[in-house]
Image (spheres, grey):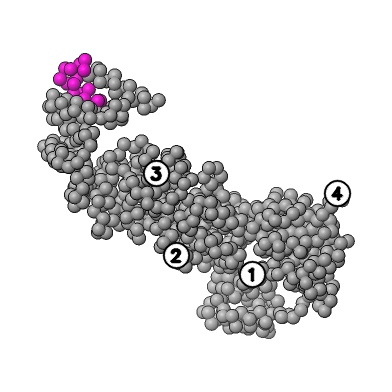
Amino acid sequence: MASEFGSLLRQLRRAAGLTQEALAERAGVSREAIAALESGRRTRPRPETVAMLTQALAVTPSQLSALRDAVPGAGKDSGPAQLRLPADAAVLIGREELLASYEQFLRPSPERLAPPVLCLHGGAGVGKSAAAIHLAHQVAADYPSGRLFLRLQNPDGSAVPPYDALGQLLRRLGVAADQLPDNVDLRSILFRELLHDQQTLLVYDDVLESDQVRPLLPAASGCGVVITSRRPLLELDQQVRPPLEPLDESASRRLLAQLTHGRVVQEDPATAAIVTYCGGLPLALRIIGLQLAARASDVELAQHLALTAARLSNEQSRLDLVSTFRASLELTLRAANDDCRLLFARLALVEADSFATWVAAALLDCSEVRAEQVLEQLVDLGLLQIQSLGRSPRYTMHGLVRAGAVEQLGTAGSAEAAERFLRAAVRLATCADAAVPHGLPLGALGDVSGQALPAAEHLAAAEPLEWFDAELAVLRAGVGLAPGMPQLAGALALALQGYLTVADEHQLRFDLLALAVDSVRGAGLPVLEARLDHGLFSAELRRTGRNLDQLAARSVQSAEASGDPRLIWNAYRQSGLNALSAGRLEDARYDVRRAFDVLEASPHQPQELAVPLRLAGVVESVAGEHAAAAGFLRRAAGLHSELTRGRAITLADLVDALVEIGAIDEAAAYTQEARAIVAGAAG
């Protein structure tokens, strides 16, 4: 006969329109467990199981209360049973060597003057509780007085006060309710007195802060303490603080295989995808592994494996598959301060594998010093990991944790934060671009209106290529925000051009410029559109050389629409270069004349004439008019500053023309000068 809990569970499941299989998949428990509860074969579900089922069913507060009250013994003073150590995890992979060293630390030693205190800390879902419980079972024989387990975070995320925690511990140690001291200090003293000659292991799960657990620490050296926390609790003395890291790829695959009794093929691409999306978090892997294990046939399992991988690829709904992890993540966020919660959510705007402090400063609109403090707090909570240290530390976020950030983003002032991030990216990229010797005539816009970031600006200007190498993924993510902020994203794409040209990343340069210009068109930004079109032609010329006619025509069209003489004559120059490469000499001459006319009719620097003069010389050389070519090229070379790359290139063209007209001595002199310029640049 079904128990009261089982009957109520069945009613709620059917009201939600779920089969036992569907509820099992959503909650991360086995279908057999649900069937046993509903049929009455099992009447006392574990609190964790109740929590997973109620979350999957999205019950109301009154339904939640009814379910909890329906558990036999719920609401009654069950005394010692509330503090009993939970069962050991059936499958624990990837921690063997680490946990063995912790076991040795917990074992009694006659030289020890104080109890060993082990604080296992790490992020949500990393397996802290499972590791602590496993350790407690492994050293059980060394603590014959008993093992006590106490969770110190309430279901709503708040901390269990030391006063209440000590009350539970003292009741477990035999103190009657009416004999409990009425303040926390007296309760702590009594607790230590009762344990002074005992060998008891205390496991405190989900500790939020040091002050919460300090009154709960025994003084007797024969006792031991295992703490789990999302932060390292640096204020506690006499403890070991090993961080628990996510599992590596190999251990993650082995865990999935073992949970499914070897039915999951570790080399399957879908398995690899699941491992990647779970980020090595045992809780997520365990939920998915149990869901897969419930599949009746290998064919059904393989289908579900592929479906799970596909569903995990959607960042917007990734946590729906691992709702228990979502709950764990939410508890972590409740323990965080406002700045941590804001930054965590806003980091979802930056779709990059890693990021530096300046990103956080822009997203929070604060100084770099304050941003680093908040980042360190997120690291302590296990929500971020430090990827590398140095002059500019870099941080990273696991995929499942990032999915949680995406869910939180809607309430975190994302539009303003995204704009600040883009402005900072443009400012820093412009600083770095000014120090890159790319030689592009139309590079960054020179916009430095974003937030001042002294440390990042210094690094970008001092080591521009290294800075671009490190920040490229972040800057690409910034350009990806073009549909919402075309002006800033376009400016960022322009600031990236020089670096990408020097790095021979012509395909990426073209892709970023194309993304930006698509958003700029029709946005009433003619000058920016013209500059982006100019860059597109230049990138395509170095990339594949296709579609140059179309890109050159578009460059001319947008430049003329901008009314900017510098953009117009540069567009005519590009059109002439394209005509020359296609063998259309008259068209090339026409474009060169147009470029001269615009340039000479507008304010300009004398050296700017060197560009169309060189092109005119090359056109005449191709046409066989070598004397005319030499005249143009002599004028162009004279306008270039000495020892510049532009002068060396012009001199090389001039040498070819001089040889053709028999001016060998002059050609030899210019050849020597060009070689000296190149050698100096290389040195």
Which residue is pictured at 59% across the width and 51% down the height?
248
Depth order, front residue of 523/407? 523
323 w.r.t. 587: above or below: below
What is the x, y in percent for residue 637? Answer: 23, 27
Q: Is residue 659 magenta?
A: yes
Q: Give the distance between the C-alpha atoms of the residues marked 4 and 1, in whole angstroms.
A: 38 Å
What is the x, y in percent for residue 489? Answer: 35, 53
Mark 3 residue type: Cys
468 w.r.t. 266: above or below: above
Q: Which residue is mark 1?
A: 158
Which residue is pictured at 19% across the width and 26% down the height?
634
What is the x, y in percent for residue 181? Answer: 81, 73
Which residue is pictured at 25% across the width and 51% down the height?
527
Q: Which residue is mark 3?
A: 431
Q: Which residue is mark 4?
A: 111
Residue 113 placement, left or right of 29: right
Position of the C terminus by quadrant: top left
N-terminal of the two: label 1 or label 2?
A: 1
Looking at the image, which residue sits at the far right? 197
N-terminal of the two: label 3 or label 4?
A: 4
Q: Give the distance between the C-alpha atoms of the residues marked 1 and 2, in whole angstroms.
A: 25 Å
Position of the N terminus by quadrant: bottom right
Quadrant of residue 435 within the rendered picture: top left
Mark 1 residue type: Ser
Identify the secondary structure beneath mark 4.
loop
N-terminal of the two: label 4 or label 2?
A: 4
**Mark 2 Cα within 10 Å, few/some/many (few <14, many 20+)?**
some
Q: Give the distance between the C-alpha atoms of the residues marked 1 and 3, in whole angstroms.
A: 46 Å
Extent of the magenta region: 651-666
